[in-house]
């Protein structure tokens, strides 16, 4: 019996929640990663999906020749052509609208003030820093009770790792650079390879995978043999060739590849990024015959195709329903990945094209001509949600005649001049830097005097804003900038 004042009952409530399907997650992941990381993401898909193959340069050349040769090359009686999955991939075009509908229905799309934007950015900038790979490894090195020369070699090796956890030079070169005996450096390398995470200190991807198998006691497995002796065939997922070379059944090869797929190709990347990480431009913009030309960086994107071997198996009709359904699902997934990669490149190109249109004066004259621009403006023009633009810009860089810039650099708030022109806050900072650079060192300008000079250019900016921008530029106040002869 319920106590006084209490009652029980059933109530129905309708709520709205966005659930990301696996294919949507894959598409968003491919859209968001940088050029250097995209290859690793694609390699993960190659390991997980047996129907995907990476095309060699010879295959790419033949594919181009076939597509540009016979006019009737696109029509044949191959029964594999019956497997048309195009309708299954309309979700790609729908992803942007799904986000847009969700954000609209839940009130997620709204205008924010400059003060709110600054508070939000301060929140992101204030996130605590994770332990770096180097810190994690040095803690293990200090606990290894190694003699001084070995510990010195270990520290040198740790400092020579890239963000994946791979060595950037040969041991002989590193020994010369560190002025240490080669055998000491080799001993340090063997010790480093026992550290956590498994795979650290490898010379290349194959070595990284073998180290991980060794940690698991699987150094004599079929997986280890494939990596050691037939790595090129493994990377291109040539299962029939691997079966022929090893003399093993295709299902054994498949099991070995699935085991390899559980390994981490870049164990160092689970830690905080190194501040000195190499930047590779995802897109380049240069002037050609008076017009601005966009060039996408495809160097780090493997060319994929669906395996004809598995298409043939389905077309012959000799598989069980369960086997056929499994392969059809993998083919659909593989086709989706191929389409997602193509859409990623198209989206980056479309956004870059709009950036050029809006920031044409920047490309022509430089940073001082940067104008205010929001992601919402670009999203409305290309017909996607602002979050899609944000993801497409994340971790991406653009090479311009004025240097390499993070693509988000072109999106900034700004001010309105007396002449009615929009001026980005980045351009205002550039003006402040130029004013201070040209001042009399013996009589440096105060922040209020800089306000007056900007006012003379038609820009109304508060003194505290000038002080804030000056500090962000790393410039001292006037009393500390004064120099005496």
Image: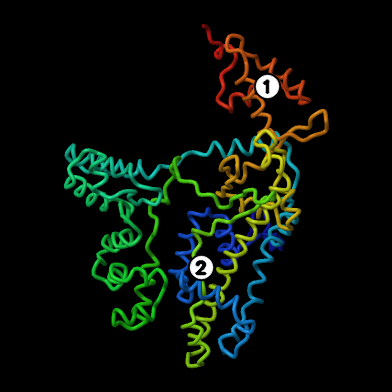
Residue 78 % position (x, y): 57, 89
**Quick one: label 2, few (<14), some, or many (20+) residues within 10 Å?**
some
Q: Pick whichever of labels 1 and 2 is earlier in the sequence.
A: 2
> What is the distance, in whole Å, between disc 1 and disc 2 at their CAs?
53 Å
Badge number at residue 303: 2
The extreme right residue here reads: 419
Residue 11 against residue 289 in the figure, above or below: below
Circle 1 — which element?
helix
| Any part of residue 99 in sight | yes
Residue 115 % position (x, y): 70, 33
| Any part of residue 4 in sight | no
Residue 244 against residue 293 in the figure, above or below: below
Q: Which quadrant holds residue 340?
A: bottom right
Residue 107 % position (x, y): 74, 51
Residue 70 % position (x, y): 61, 82
**Quick one: label 1, few (<14), some, or many (20+) residues within 10 Å?**
few
**Residue at x 47%, y 60% (from the top left corner):** 39
Badge number at residue 399: none
- Quadrant of the image containing the N terminus: bottom right
Q: Mark 1 sits on what residue?
A: 464
The extreme top residue here reads: 485
């Amino acid at each position: 019996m319920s106590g006084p004042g209490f009652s029980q009952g059933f109530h129905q409530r309708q709520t709205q929640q966005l659930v990301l399907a696996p294919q949507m997650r894959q598409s968003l992941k491919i859209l968001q990663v940088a050029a250097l990381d995209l290859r690793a993401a694609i390699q993960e898909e190659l390991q997980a999906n047996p129907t995907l193959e990476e095309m060699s340069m010879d295959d790419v050349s033949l594919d181009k020749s076939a597509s540009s040769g016979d006019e009737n090359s696109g029509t044949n009686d191959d029964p594999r052509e019956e497997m048309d999955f195009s309708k299954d991939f309309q979700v790609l075009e729908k992803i942007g609208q799904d986000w847009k509908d969700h954000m609209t229905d839940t009130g997620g799309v709204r205008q924010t003030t400059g003060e709110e934007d600054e508070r939000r950015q301060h929140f992101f900038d204030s996130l605590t820093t994770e332990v770096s790979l180097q810190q994690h490894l040095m803690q293990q090195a200090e606990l290894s009770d190694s003699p001084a020369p070995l510990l010195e070699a270990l520290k040198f090796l740790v400092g020579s790792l890239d963000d994946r956890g791979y060595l950037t030079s040969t041991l002989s070169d590193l020994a010369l650079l560190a002025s240490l005996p080669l055998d000491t450096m080799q001993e340090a390398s063997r010790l480093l390879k026992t550290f956590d995470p498994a795979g650290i200190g490898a010379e290349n991807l194959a070595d990284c995978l073998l180290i991980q198998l060794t940690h698991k006691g699987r150094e004599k497995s079929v997986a280890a043999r494939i990596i050691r002796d037939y790595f090129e065939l493994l990377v291109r997922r040539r299962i029939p060739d691997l079966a022929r070379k090893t003399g093993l059944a295709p299902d054994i090869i498949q099991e070995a590849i699935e085991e390899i797929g559980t390994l981490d190709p870049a164990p160092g990347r689970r830690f905080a990024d190194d501040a000195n990480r190499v930047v590779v431009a995802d897109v380049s913009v240069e002037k050609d015959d008076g017009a601005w030309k966009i060039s996408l960086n495809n160097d780090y994107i493997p060319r994929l195709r669906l395996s004809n071997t598995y298409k043939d198996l389905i077309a012959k009709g000799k598989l069980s329903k369960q086997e056929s359904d499994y392969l059809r699902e993998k083919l659909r997934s593989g086709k989706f990945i191929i389409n997602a990669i193509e859409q990623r490149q198209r989206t980056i190109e479309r956004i870059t094209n709009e950036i050029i249109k809006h920031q044409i004066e920047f490309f022509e004259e430089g940073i001082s001509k940067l104008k205010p621009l929001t992601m919402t403006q670009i999203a409305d023009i290309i017909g996607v949600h602002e979050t899609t633009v944000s993801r497409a810009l994340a971790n991406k860089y653009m090479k311009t005649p004025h240097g390499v810039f993070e693509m988000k650099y072109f999106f900034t708030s700004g001010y309105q001049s007396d002449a009615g022109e929009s001026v980005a806050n980045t351009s205002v900072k550039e003006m402040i830097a130029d004013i201070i650079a040209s001042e009399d060192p013996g009589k440096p300008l105060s922040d209020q005097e800089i306000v007056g000079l900007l006012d003379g250019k038609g820009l109304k900016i508060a003194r505290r804003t000038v002080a804030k921008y000056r500090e962000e530029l790393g410039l001292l106040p006037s009393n500390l900038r004064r120099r005496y002869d």
